Image (cartoon, grey):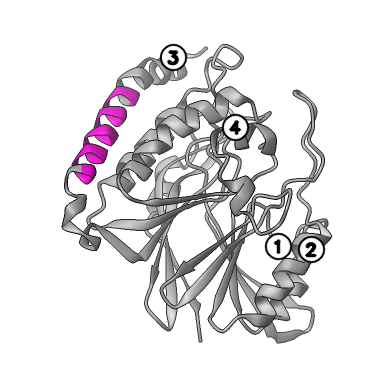
Amino acid sequence: MDTTRRSFIKGLAATAGVCAMRGAADAADAAATMGAGAARHDPNLVAFISDLHVNGLKAEVPTHCYEEVCLRKTVADILAMRPMPANVVCLGDIAYHWGQREDYALASEILKPLSDAGIRLVLGMGNHDRRGNFLEYWPEYAKSSPVEGRIVSKLALPGLDLLLLDTLNALEVEKFQKSKPGEMDAAQREWLDAQLQSAVRPVLVCSHHRPDEDKVGLVRQLKGAKACKGHIYGHWHYWTRDIVYDGWTPQKILPIVGIPSTGHWGDIGYATMRIFGDRVEITNHQNDFFFTGGPGDDQPNRDYIVRERDGQTFTLSLS
């Protein structure tokens, strides 16, 4: 381990302690003042987090504890907002790599201050998650999901509905078996079609995977629906703003937004979405940038990337 990495890892314990204390303090403050009412929570503000990759089995990958530190910082940042967002949406890959119970145990402990502060936490599945182990810690999703066997959520926001899909491959895989690409099952496609066709308000669709991945194949389904105003995803670990065109007919487009990872690799941070009635504005909050080898001061162009991407926005029209 080089000097830079060693120094970083040495500082993690102190950072984690500070973030944990700050998160606990904010949670206690929120709980103590919940009687103040909705002023503490802005219903027009949503925070998006993705690709947490929390490692509950630190003995397996002892140097990969920065995911925990970064997630604690993100939670503390959200709790420090005044007012706080009424909703936090997680786009999957909660678990480190194999969807172990220990990963979800640690993630539930880190995320608990959000719920304690009165924030509604909505969790989704990524390709590194395992539904069975996830449901041991959040069993309510087995009943609340409108699609049997999947972790699907519908969130009513001011002036729009948000649909969080489950693009985790249908087959549960064993530990150390490589995860398969994302996919959509027939039952979920039918449910999505019914939601889009019956919608009386604008709809934003979210999933862990991009809508144009082969086995996900959501682009045509979403672009063909008048109610759908855009798609938000994770998985790539990069803050991305894009518009998907329908071949040579550019009047049919689908705006898509990629959310950074909270602490695994790539763009490190989270995003917020503010609802303005006729539009939503999604803002990137960039905390760091590093490649797959891990964080450190030797990352090429790190400061430039963080400076350029932090605060970037993407506006989606709801009209």
Residue drawn at (22%, 55%) of the image? 82
Q: Position of residue 182 (x, y in %)?
A: 76, 49
- State which region is magenta: 16-31
Q: Which residue is mark 2?
A: 217
Q: Position of residue 171 (x, y in %)?
A: 82, 40
| Mark closer to the chain start, 4 or 2 | 4
Front-most of residues 54 and 14: 54
Q: Amino acid at mark 2?
A: Gly
Q: Residues within 10 Å of mark 3 (few under 14, many from 20)?
A: few
Q: Which residue is mark 4?
A: 136
* Left or right for 34, reference 204: left
> Which of the labelled discs sits on residue 211, or is there none?
1
Q: Residues within 10 Å of mark 1 (few under 14, many from 20)?
A: many
Magenta stretch mostly in which secondary structure? helix
On screen, 26 above or below 297? below
* Left or right for 287, reference 197: left
* Left or right for 166, reference 298: right
Q: Which residue is mark 3?
A: 6
Q: Are marks 1 and 4 in contact (CB under 8 Å)?
A: no
Q: Amino acid at mark 4?
A: Glu
Q: Are marks 4 and 2 in contact (CB under 8 Å)?
A: no
